[in-house]
Amino acid sequence: MPGVADALDGTALLNWGRLTLAALERHRDEINALNVFPVADSDTGTNLLSTMRAAVRGAEAAAAATPNIDTAPRLAAPDHCARADGGGDRAVTAGQSGADVPGDGVMAVSGPRAQDVTAAMARAATIGARGNSGIILSQVLRGISDAVAEGPLTEQALRVALLRAARLVREALSSPIEGTMLTVLDRAAERAADCPERDLVSVALAAADGAAKALGETPAQLGVLREAGVVDAGARGLLVLLDELVAAAGGSSPARPVYRPGAPEERSCRPAPGGRHGSTEDTTAAANGPGLGADGSVGGDAADDRTGSAAGSALNPTAAVSNSDMCGAAGGVGAAVPHYEVMFLVRGTDEGRIGVLRDRLGALGDSVVVVGDGADTWSAHVHCGDAGAAVEAGLAVGVLSGIRIETLAVSGHPPRGKADRAILAVASGAGAARLFEDAGAVVLQGAVTSEILLDAIRGVPYREVLVLPNGALPAHELVAVSVAARDGQREVLMLPCGSMVQGLAALSLHDAGRAAADDAFAMSEAAAGTRWGALRMAPERALTMVGMCEAGDGLGLVGHDVVVIDSDVRAAGRTLLDRMLGLGGELVTMLIGCDAPEGLSADLAGHVAAGFPGVEVVVYPGGQVDDLVQIGVE
């Protein structure tokens, strides 16, 4: 970072989101391996990563659409920022080299407002949340959003944000249980509130160190963690988020142990030099609470103190079961074993009816969390034996969308390392390529032939390769490539993605913790559930299935078929959206091509908002050549 900041504006908070996303990618396998409470299905790291990815994409879209102004307190610049003419200090914020400072000492920072960025993050995280940990993460982001309503994230705003987030999380849970993500969030908020220093880095570091200490104490609070010799998985993810906030503010993330069963090796993702902005307490002591050894493993008297219902659940496989990614919600011991994870979004309701829904879901199962985005959308989660009853409970209080029902799969042997698998995606355009890369795929850009694709597959150093062709080649050529690429040392699975928007939908459900066939099936379902179309400009006069078009006409395609011709390209785009959404849809994704007319994306997004209330619209710069806009409807 270019300096220590007393405030994070919208640009710096977006940078924090990206730092957190990258850190969660690095720690995903570590967090998944900790995921044993009370079922070892090893998905908490994946859920947090998927939710944060949705949040960052939402923030990027908001930042691109709202180039507003934040105001931040004036800072004293580091020595290297002093003006050469000796004419005084310049004000700086994290991620910026400087800005004009009015005479009143308040700095005008160009770029998106902190409120716009964080509100978009919270909303996108609520809509795109995976698992309980993802829903809890959305409330941490909402707490920050609520705290920056009047300006950037200052040290005082951070104190308010964490206290607000802790309260939102406890209100959202049907049956809070200690030793989980909510406990660690509480401790972080308390440490931030009690921090005597008045700068952002110190307050952020106090919160992170408080979270690390509380994380080390989770096995002493929850018997199932103590039995497995691990700390809480969701809480470990929260610590990643707080450590990255320290880095975003200009400090150094303190060293943390690799949290896993047994003796973890001490390591740091970044150098942690001593001094004011290094860790304020011994790292090992902060990370390891009562009952944990200096290496982060469980030991001592606390490990033998196996009392309480949580320990009973660990020893009795027929006790109440819920997703290991519970993050503070638990059902009573002896309750019916839940078989399904049910999630859905609720709109057209109010706080009173949401309370009724929370109680009803609590009666049906456990691991209940119902949270709002601060506007008009709530996300609900429950583990239960009757998925239909859970959906009916939601229908009784509002309008549902995004219904997702999954069988709870329990793995007695959670993965201890990265899967030997890669995703290879074909992409056209720099913006689209970046989206796939950010989601963890290896990207093949440019014109693609069968030979080029085959060489790319053979060049990927993994045993399992899932390919997102994204319409680059016809089906018979893909089959031939797939057969040729299998050499006894490599398994190749071609996913049925006819466009980049289908490929992005598929990639959002990628889970390296699953078997390759299961992963490919889930991703293929996501692709198949995404209708895709494109807006193009006719290069010449031609006959289509809906009539003759002239050069320069706007063409609307659904799949590969022309369904709209209009001399006005924008009108063709609006008509195409009407056709595609006429069959239903909850989310519209638009990839904007490099030759799209200026203002086209705003025009089309506004058309959806006006004609289809409740449908979410996400716009990304794709940079593709052939399509002015590529559209996906999920």
Image (tube, rainbow, N blue to C red):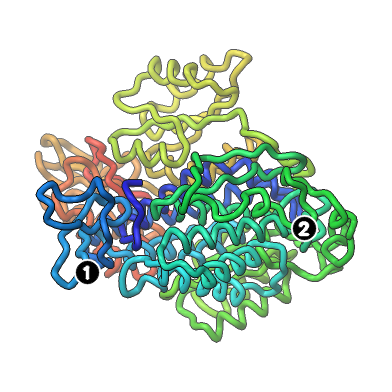
> Mark 1 near mark 2, Cβ–Cβ under 8 Å?
no
Q: Where residue 354 sits in the image (x, y, percent)?
A: 56, 80
**Visible residue check, residue 30:** yes
The amino acid marked with disc number 1 is Val
Q: Where residue 110 sits in the image (x, y, percent)?
A: 20, 59
Please indicate whether residue 457 sits to the left or right of residue 180 in the image. left
Q: Residue drawn at (30%, 26%), measured in percent from left and top?
A: 446
Displayed quadrant of residue 131 = bottom right
Q: Where residue 196 sits in the image (x, y, percent)?
A: 49, 70
Q: Which residue is mark 2?
A: 290
* Residue 199: numbered disc: none
Displayed quadrant of residue 426 = top left
Please indicate whether residue 126 sits to the left or right of residue 220 in the image. left
Q: Secondary structure at mark 1?
A: strand
Q: Residue drawn at (43%, 49%), measured in percent from left and top?
A: 530
Pick the front one: 239 or 154: 154
**Visible residue check, residue 557:** no
Q: Which residue is mark 1?
A: 106
